[in-house]
Image: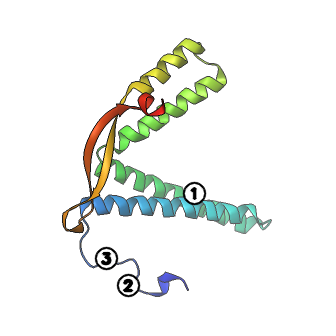
């Protein structure tokens, strides 16, 4: 039975910490992405033009919601944009490799830059009073050293 039948479903009995809020927003973002997939799958599975149009429209509205949650994460989690930029840069390198743009030397230097960026190695442990995870830094490496 769907949880929305329970008017108290999803309610949290206390105020969330900032870290808990960030995790909750990540979950909300995931729900939006899942809804987009569901609506588009339904649109692909029908020949009814009105149903297809409505489903695609609703899916696009969910994409706007996903953008809102992503922006909120960028504000709440100060390092979020750096991780997104790192990921985008990695995809740009792969795209350049596939398209042959920039020549092999330029691609190599970009990859080497990414591989030499410091990456913290962390041990995640439970925080005091079960308030959420905390991290203990146990060393620092580069992406390249983790691959080797």
What residue is shown with label 2?
Answer: 8
Q: Is residue 4 left or right of residue 118?
A: right
Residue at 49% x, 82% y: name it.
3
The quarter of the displayed image where residue 20 is located: bottom left
Marks 1/3 in contact by CB < 8 Å: the verdict is: no
Of labels 2 and 1, the one closer to you: 2
Which badge, 2 or 1, is on the more N-terminal residue? 2
Q: CA distance from mark 2 to mark 1?
A: 28 Å
Q: Residue at x 49, y 23 (%)?
A: 111
Residue pointed to by mark 3:
12
- Count all numbered tags in the image, as a single digit: 3
Q: Position of residue 26 (x, y in %)?
A: 41, 58
Q: Residues within 10 Å of mark 3 (few under 14, many from 20)?
A: few
In the picture of the structure, the residue carrying the numbered disc 1 is 60
Give above or below for 147 relative to 54.
Answer: above
Q: Nearer the viewer, mark 1 or mark 3?
A: 3
Callout 2 touching callout 1 (CB < 8 Å): no
Between the C-alphas of marks 3 and 2, the distance is: 9 Å
First in sequence: mark 1 vs mark 3 = 3
Dot 3: element: loop
Picture quarter with the N terminus = bottom right
Q: How was this image coloured?
A: rainbow
- Callout 1: helix, strand or loop? helix
Q: Residue 144 or 70: which is nearer the viewer?
A: 144
Indicate the position of residue 78 as horizontal and vertical percent values.
Answer: 28, 45
Residue 112, above or below 41 = above
Q: Is residue 137 above or below residue 52?
A: above
Res. 126 mark: none
Q: Which of the 4 image quadrants contains residue 138?
A: top left
């Amino acid at each position: 039975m769907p949880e929305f039948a329970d008017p108290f479903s999803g309610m949290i009995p206390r105020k969330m910490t900032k870290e808990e809020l960030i995790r909750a927003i990540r979950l909300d973002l995931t729900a939006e992405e899942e809804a987009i997939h569901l609506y588009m799958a339904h649109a692909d599975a029908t020949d009814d033009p009105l149903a297809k149009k409505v489903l695609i429209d609703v899916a696009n509205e969910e994409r706007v919601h996903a953008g809102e949650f992503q922006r909120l994460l960028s504000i709440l989690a100060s390092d979020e944009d750096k991780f997104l930029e790192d990921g985008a840069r990695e995809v740009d390198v792969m795209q350049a490799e596939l398209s042959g743009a920039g020549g092999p030397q330029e691609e190599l230097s970009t990859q080497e830059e990414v591989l030499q960026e410091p990456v913290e190695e962390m041990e995640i442990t439970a925080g005091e009073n079960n308030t959420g995870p905390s991290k203990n830094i146990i060393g620092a490496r580069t992406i390249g050293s983790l691959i080797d």
